[in-house]
Image (tube, helix red, strand yellow):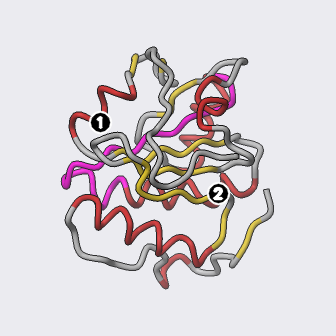
Amino acid sequence: MTTEQGQKAPFPDREFDDAEGRAHDLKRVLESGPVLLGIYKSSCASSKQMFPFLERLHERHRADGLTVMGVSQDSANITRSFARRYGITFPILLEGEDYPISRAFDIMATPTVFLIDRDGTIAYTTMGFMKPALDALGDAVADAVGASHAPLVMSADGEVPMFVPG
């Protein structure tokens, strides 16, 4: 069963390199505020829909103390290509073949997104891509950083599907 809201985030006790070769310790990242962690596979259609909205949350709330991080189940080259294609500017960690983060969080599908409070507790989680869940995710992030609620899906986004199968 996927790690759920209210549980402690089961971060593996080690650092992970991002696609640019910089090391990150997920437990240490929490010291600066809440973390929005999105685990994905680049070939997943739902991930392709979700990650631009995670980028929007990154842009909207990084000054409020939110850290957004991706976790890629792909190689560094594929991860960098995905980030370029979808305009992702936040760090994307490389899991490697053993998928230690995906396994620790016991995800069932990609993308799976976790909002983790500074104390390490999971405040919100969502899996797959469902348009109604986007605003709930945005509201949970706003609550975590003490910001006002604002819609995550905008009219300028055009036709955002209600649901995208993985």
Q: Is residue 24 above or below residue 133?
A: above
Q: Which mark is residue 30?
A: 1
Q: Residue furthest right?
A: 165
- Badge 2 crowding class, 10 Å Cα cut-off, few under 14, some 14 to 19, many 20 or more, is many
Quadrant of residue 57 within the rendered picture: bottom left
Q: Which mark is residue 124?
A: none
- CA gap between label 1 and label 2 equals 22 Å
Q: x%, y% of residue 133?
A: 56, 72
- Seen at 51% across and 28% down, the residue is 93
Residue 77 shown in magenta: no
Q: Nearer the viewer, residue 82 or 25?
A: 25
Q: Is residue 73 left or right of residue 94?
A: right
- Seen at 23% across and 75% down, the residue is 148
Total marks in image: 2
Q: Which region shows up in magenta?
A: 58-75
Q: Amino acid at mark 1?
A: Leu
Under circle 2, the secondary element is: strand
Q: Is residue 163 left or right of residue 22?
A: right
Quadrant of residue 166 within the rendered picture: bottom right
- Seen at 21% across and 48% down, the residue is 65
Under circle 1, the secondary element is: helix
Residue 69 shown in magenta: yes
| Pointer 2 residue | 127
Q: x%, y% of residue 2?
A: 65, 46
Q: Nearer the viewer, residue 36 or 119?
A: 119
- Is the C-beta separation of discs 1 and 2 under 8 Å? no
Q: Nearer the viewer, residue 11 or 150?
A: 11
Q: Amino acid at mark 2?
A: Met
Q: x%, y% of residue 100?
A: 62, 23
Q: Is residue 69 above or below residue 141?
A: above
